[in-house]
Image (cartoon, grey):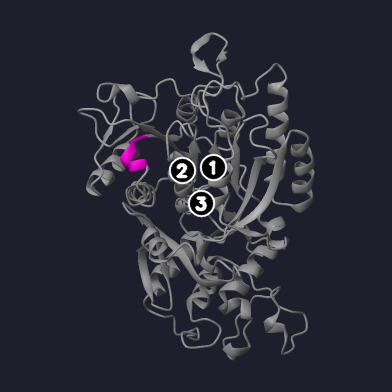
Amino acid sequence: MDHGVEEAGLAAAAAPPEVDLAALVLDYRNGMPREENTNAFRWNADSPGEIAEIIKAMRTANKGEQDTRETAARILWTYGYNLNLVQDSATHRNYLVISEQTPCQRCWGLYILRYDSSSAAVNAAVEVPHPFSDESSEEMGVEAFLKLDAKMFAMAGAHRNSNTATRPGYPNSRVSDMARSYESLFHKVHTNFTTKAPNATHVLQVHGFEARPDYPQVVLSNGSAQPHTLLRSFADQLNSAGVTAGVYDGQQYPAFGATTNPQARHTRNKGGFFYHLEAVHAVRTTPQTYSAVISALTQTLFQGSPGAVANIPYAADYDREAAVAYARRHAKNLNPDYYDWSHRELGGDCTNFLSQVMYAGGWKYSEPLVENPLSRRDSSFWYYRPGEPSTSSWTWVNANMWASFAKNTGRVEKVKYLSDVGLGDIVQMGDTVERAKWHSMIVTGFDHRGPLLSYHTRNTLDTPLWDVFQDYPHTSTMFFAWRVVKVS
């Protein structure tokens, strides 16, 4: 089960306070103990029960409703954690931040969950298990979290060697090393906020090493001798960007195979994708270089079909094949039976075209019993008037009002990740401040580049979704994906 945020509660909530999320993470890091062998990391017999309660509260908070969030905040407070809903000042996306009231009270780490009504690009998570020990892995990790638009960020709460105690039965694994511990809150957050195949999470875990002879600048692994295909694609992208990279395959670069990493093992067992990234000091501490590394990963993930079609049933009485056939037939050749809104004030012809597609697939008109001049402005109605197109409902032609109608009447359900859209799904673009939708498109096919979109107001057939996604800056544009689950 994917514990993504629900749409309804967040939409009704007041705008959260704006913060620089990257600065928040680094300020928190600066307040954590960086010394080794201090035994500041708390671990005792009560910890499993406490961790279970913290996880339960985090999942409760992530349901997307203010009352559940407040309930979770009270529970987390009793365990020394604050729960804050914030909006990042750079991306304008919303996040839940779960942080210790006094770093380090338990030294169990900082956790951030994406809490936004928009659809994320890909089902991704970012983890930083070794702050201080792997210098600047924190900076690199939080930038990756924001640029990947990932759903979860986890940062350990102390130096990996903070505690001299070792895990029972594992003399080489200290309890403060999150890349060795199966019992920690860090690992339990990982297991609870990553998902299994077919809609599996891509987990990036950032590490560092000192440069070695015959080793590249970056070594990638999924914790086994059988690296997945995307890991090799990531390495290829890095090498093309001028950052030397190699992949552990059981033979090459054995020092950084991550074969005992519990998060890697858990991700593989779920059929997910683990990216254990070891980078030399010069890569981690040079913003331009580690930004290039992150860009290489986005190029790897934002292409092809890195996800699977979302597990949301299509409406049984919706003929999406007919809808897609209509879209393909009229994407570039307008249907003369409909007025062309390309130059009208309501936002162009894209949503008029989308409404035609929906109608071709079986959507039913929703009309007022008694029509008056204001009826067409009511978001609870959806209809077209062939004889007098200017009296058609605004929901027929306006992207934002179409989305309001479709959501409020339950005709669509949000697809959480753009990578998981299927044939006939709708993709809309909106602004990050008002969150108003201003462009509508439909998925009309797939090829080696991934989902293909067709739309009007630049009458386009089969353009790659990832090209559209990367043409618009994430700081000013949000994407929303929908699946039809009802026709009336």
Pick whichever of labels 1 and 3 is earlier in the sequence.
Answer: 1
Find residue 19 and report its image quarter.
bottom right
- Hey, which residue is sitting farthest top in the picture? 169
Badge 3 crowding class, 10 Å Cα cut-off, few under 14, some 14 to 19, many 20 or more, is: many
Viewer-closest of 34 and 314: 34
How crowded pointer 1 is (Cα within 10 Å; few <14, some 14-19, many 20+) is rated as many
Q: Which residue is mark 2?
A: 141
**Is residue 456 shown left or right of residue 255?**
right
Residue 282 figure quarter: top left
The alpha-carbon separation of the residues under discs 1 and 3 comes to 17 Å
Q: Is residue 307 visible?
A: no
Q: Residue at x 69, y 75 (%)?
A: 379
**Which mark is in front, 2 or 1?**
2
Residue bearing the label numbered 1: 153
Please name the amino acid that badge 1 sits on. Answer: Phe
**Mark 2 residue element:** helix
In the rendered structure, the answer to whether residue 369 lies left or right of residue 153 reads: right
Q: Amino acid at mark 2?
A: Gly
**Residue type beneath disc 3:** Tyr
For mark 2, does the 10 Å Cα neighbourhood hold few (<14), some (14 to 19), or many (20 or more) residues? Answer: many
What residue is disc 3 on?
Answer: 417
Q: x and y percent of residue 318 in the render?
A: 57, 60
Q: Are marks 2 and 1 in contact (CB under 8 Å)?
A: yes
Where's the N terminus, which quadrant? top right
Query: Magenta segment, which residues?
Result: 278-284
